[in-house]
Amino acid sequence: MEIYKQTNPATAVLDKTTPPIGYVHSIETFGSVDGPGIRYVLFLQGCRMRCQFCHNPDTWNTGVGDEMTADQILADAEKYKAFWGKQGGITTSGGEALLQIDFLIDLFKKAHAKGIRTCLDTCGQPFTRQQPWFDKFEELMRYTDISLVDIKQINPREHKRLTGWSNENIFDMLQYMLDHNKHVWIRHVLVPQRTDYDNQLIQIGNYIKTIAPIVDKVEVLPYHTMGVNKYEGLGLKYPLEGIEPPTAARVKNAEHLLHTADYQRYRDYPNYK
Ligand code: SF4
């Protein structure tokens, strides 16, 4: 049997005779921060970004990790279904989950057929309107209940400096989501000396207002140093050497400038606690 490998996900051709294989970094069975309610969170391998604050550099490589099919994932996930209530379900994160879009389509389609709610956690970097990728993205969106999207920097040049990639296609993805009423949680990682500048935060806050109809929640995620040991283990230089997490006052300031209190629609989800 030929195994489907996504070494070049943008151009890879799926062999329809075999189910897409997901390359899994790790699984969290009781995730409470990656989408609504309690969730089964699948961390997938592979990311092209190189965010200076990344705390999961061990997810960057593609084509490695545990090989699992959607059916195998769902069989495992369903053991925890009783804990999901009316909000929870499955979240795919990473790494960058969209690099394994064929697998995501298979997983989310089968999850929906079982009545399981789906959440896509993405940085949006693989997004393109080029075919055949765009058709796949549209199909994936049909089976996606909510997406968690990072806005890392508003300025494309600064975004490239922080992550290695520009952000125009990420805003294009959010435009697609706005045009098709696909709801999102927006997240911003607050990093002193990198993203914690009032003028940038004000610009991000102003941008979020332009997509407000689909924004159910805005979160400020304070940078932390828990990934430092992973860099050492991988023999990589840590890019944010000497930078400490933001103070509580700066986090509060960012929440104020991003108007997080204005985006509370998630409280209307069924059984919100
Ligand atoms: S997008 Fe996520 S996984 Fe990729 S480098 Fe950035 S923080 Fe790390």
Image (cartoon, helix red, strand yellow):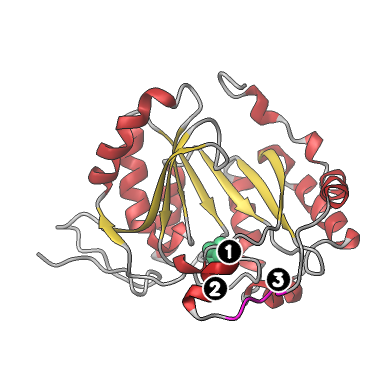
Which residue position is annotated with label 2?
A: 231
Q: Earlier in the sequence, mark 2 or mark 3?
A: 3
How far apart are the two marked residues, 2 and 3, measured between alpha carbons? 21 Å
Label ID, residue 22: none
Which residue position is annotated with label 3?
A: 159
Between tags 3 and 1, which lies in front? 1
How far apart are the two marked residues, 2 and 1, measured between alpha carbons? 7 Å
Between tags 2 and 3, which lies in front? 2
Do the residues under discs 2 and 1 have CB atoms within 8 angstroms?
yes
Which residue position is annotated with label 1?
A: 227
Q: Secondary structure at mark 1?
A: loop
Position of 25 with respect to 220 (left or right) is left
Q: Secondary structure at mark 3?
A: helix
Image quarter for ligand 1 equals bottom right
Q: Residues within 10 Å of mark 1 (few under 14, many from 20)?
A: some
Image coords of residue 108 (percent x, y): 37, 43
Give the overall secondary structure of the magenta segment: loop
Compare residues 47 and 156 and report the one nearer the observer.
Answer: 47
Image coords of residue 197 (percent x, y): 87, 62
Is residue 52 found inside the magenta-colored segment of the image? no
Region rendered in magenta:
237-241
Position of 125 with respect to 240 (left or right) is left
Q: Secondary structure at mark 2?
A: helix
Image coords of residue 134 (percent x, y): 45, 60
Q: Is residue 214 above or below residue 270?
A: below
Q: Earlier in the sequence, mark 3 or mark 1?
A: 3
Which amino acid, by three-letter code, is at mark 1? Gly
